[in-house]
Amino acid sequence: MIGTDQRDNLTPEEQKKLGTGTEAGARTDTMLILYTPPKGGSVLISLPRDSYVAIPGHGHNKLNAAYAIGGPKLLMQTVEQATGLRMDGYIEVGFAGFVDMVDAVGGVQVCLDKAMVDKDSHTNLPAGCQRLDGIQALGYVRMRKADPLGDLGRVKRQQQVTAAVARKVMSPWTVINPIRYWRVNMAAAESFTRGTDTSLWTAARTMIGLHRATGSDGIRITVPIAQANASTAAGSSVLWDKAKARALFEALAEGDTSVAEQYAR
């Protein structure tokens, strides 16, 4: 599941409203692998966008460069090569789509230990518990420069909001409330892009899997990290712990989620 920072389909007014900036082209701000086992909770794995990996045919670079170079196809190839896992589907959402989905479910609740202020992502949130609308949630998940954990802090917030939206989409209230049901379905139809080989059934299973990942037996983790700010040819990058990442992905390939559970503790 991919969240992009594509701005080409936004008007200057929309770019200003959403606080997206004006950079040309598209990059991936969010990359998540959802694994749904035959039974039990799902596993949601964040792949930091600055992960330093081998990109097929293009040497080593940050993971989000794969999308910028070759779009979804090259990104999928890169992730499959880096993890050893076969991806069964691809779902992408852009800035506007993310905002629409959050608004469709009535916003998301977050609790902050201290105020969050970041001019680059247009984030200005007070300390305490509060409901974020779509634009506020976009800034919340994009902010990283004011986060001492940088990209790793951001991926945790991305998982938090993704899980919150999934819970609301799958809640009985969405089904029995005709207005919210209509808003969610309209937002989903207009916000998400499926890969050419991704069926509607796979897309539906993805939402179910996300809901399971937020449950008591669900698992949400970041790929094991060796260095968060390593100096590489691509600049400051995230290096995976190769041995731990290999053990994690090999276990998932066998349907075993016990290794993932260790990293969720």
Image: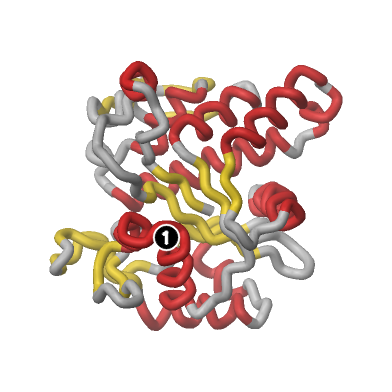
Q: Amino acid at mark 1?
A: Leu
Residue 20, percent from left and from top: 32, 30
Q: Measuring 69% from the left and 48% from the top, which residue is drawn there? A: 207
> Which residue shows up at 78% across the image and 66% down it?
39
Q: Residue at x 40, y 57 (%)?
A: 71
7 left or right of 103 in image: left
Q: Is residue 230 visible?
A: yes
Residue 8 vertical placement versus 226 (above, below) = above
Image color mode: secondary structure
Circle count: 1
Query: Which type of secondary structure does the marked residue at label 1 adopt?
Result: loop
Tell which of 97 and 122 is nearer to you.
97
Q: Quadrant of residue 187?
A: top right
Residue 29 x %, y %:
38, 47
Q: Answer with left or right where residue 49 lies relative to residue 46.
A: left
Residue pushed farthest right? 176
The picture places residue 190, in percent across and down from the top left corner, at 61, 33
Count neighbours of disc 1 (C-alpha within 10 A) and say few if under 14, some if 14 to 19, many if 20 or more: many
**What residue sits 40% from the left and 68% below the top?**
224
Residue identifier under label 1: 47
The x and y percentages for residue 253 are: 61, 79
Any part of residue 217 in sight: no
Q: Nearer the viewer, residue 59 or 116?
A: 59
